[in-house]
Image: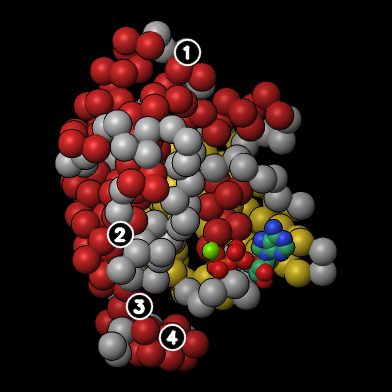
Amino acid sequence: MKLELKGVTKLYGETAALHEVDLTVPAGVRVLGLIGPSGGGKSTLLRLAGGLEVPDAGTITVGGDVLARDEATLTEHRRRNGFLFQSFNLFPHYTALENVMLPLRVVQGKSPAEAREAAEQCLRRFGLEKHLLQRPAELSGGQQQRAALARAIAARPRLLILDEPTSALDPEMTAEVLEVIEELCRDGQEIVLSTHEMGFARAVADHVVFLAEGRVVEEGKQIFEAAAHEQVQRFLSRVMKY
Ligand SMILES: Nc1ncnc2c1ncn2[C@@H]1O[C@H](COP(=O)(O)OP(=O)(O)O)[C@@H](O)[C@H]1O
Ligand SMILES: [Mg+2]
């Protein structure tokens, strides 16, 4: 993936969610993992990379192009990405099938038949063929999150942006969702994800970035064996202990 941040600052009132962040994702990286303590700026970075928000200072380059700030460019950029957030954001009054079809119809302008075909294919891929007509409340957490993933990839996004996709799930459902994400990685999908599943980040990410207090503290997968910064060592030894 081609993703670069230069001097990116994002403010929420007095808080700098990101503070002059410089980040160049090394060439050849397909899966980028963001890790670090809560409040460190992971979600903010994902929202900025996806064009859901604009920085207060600095530039973001995606796919070689500097992301412009006008609404038309941002809308176009958002359409090219797929998103999944920590809590399931399916529409409760639509079935799984309708939830996946909706963006294909509205955003991609596909015909009902085309949208249905593509949506069914995505849901089948994630083992939800028996649940097409169920509403979110009739699905388990893991099934809901797999349906949300099906929706995120249905339009074949250039970049899939996953913000703590398993944080609201119990261990068995976490495993279920991680398997699906792993399959997408193997398939060559470009993914930026934030996670507190360190084992998973280590297994699937080609590159990891440790964010704390709005800054990149350290990056690279060697941090799992030998982090240079004490803050990173402390964090990892604490979260990987149990
Ligand atoms: N919409 C918002 N309004 C106000 N403050 C926010 C908002 N989003 C994030 N923040 C603040 O920015 C900082 C970084 O948050 P976030 O990017 O959500 O971190 P993480 O995802 O690593 O937990 C935190 O201090 C958080 O409280
Ligand atoms: Mg977050």
**In terms of secondary structure, where does tag 4 sit?**
helix
Tell me the crowding category of disc 1: few under 14, some 14 to 19, or many 20 or more residues within 10 angstroms, Cα based.
Answer: few
Q: Residue 53's x, y, as percent?
A: 67, 45
- Quadrant location, the C terminus: bottom left
Label 2 sits on residue? 205
Label 1 sits on residue? 109
- Circle nearer the N terminus (2, 1): 1
- Could you say which disc has been placed on residue 235 in the image? 4
Q: Identity of the amino acid at label 4?
A: Phe
Q: Residue at x 21, y 57 (%)?
A: 176
Ligand 1 resides in the quarter of the picture at bottom right
Cα separation, mark 3 vs mark 4, equals: 11 Å
Tell me the crowding category of disc 3: few under 14, some 14 to 19, or many 20 or more residues within 10 angstroms, Cα based.
Answer: some
Determine whether label 3 and label 2 are within 8 Å by CB. no
- Number of the front mark, 1 or 3: 1
Q: Quadrant of residue 200?
A: bottom left
- Circle nearer the N terminus (3, 2): 2
Cα separation, mark 3 vs mark 2, equals: 13 Å
Q: Residue at x 42, y 21 (%)?
A: 104
Cα separation, mark 2 vs mark 4, equals: 18 Å
- Number of the front mark, 1 or 4: 1
Q: Residue 221's x, y, as percent?
A: 32, 70
Label 3 sits on residue? 223
Tell me the crowding category of disc 4: few under 14, some 14 to 19, or many 20 or more residues within 10 angstroms, Cα based.
Answer: some
- Could you say which disc has been placed on residue 125 in the image? none
Q: Residue at x 60, y 57 (%)?
A: 44
- Circle nearer the N terminus (1, 3): 1
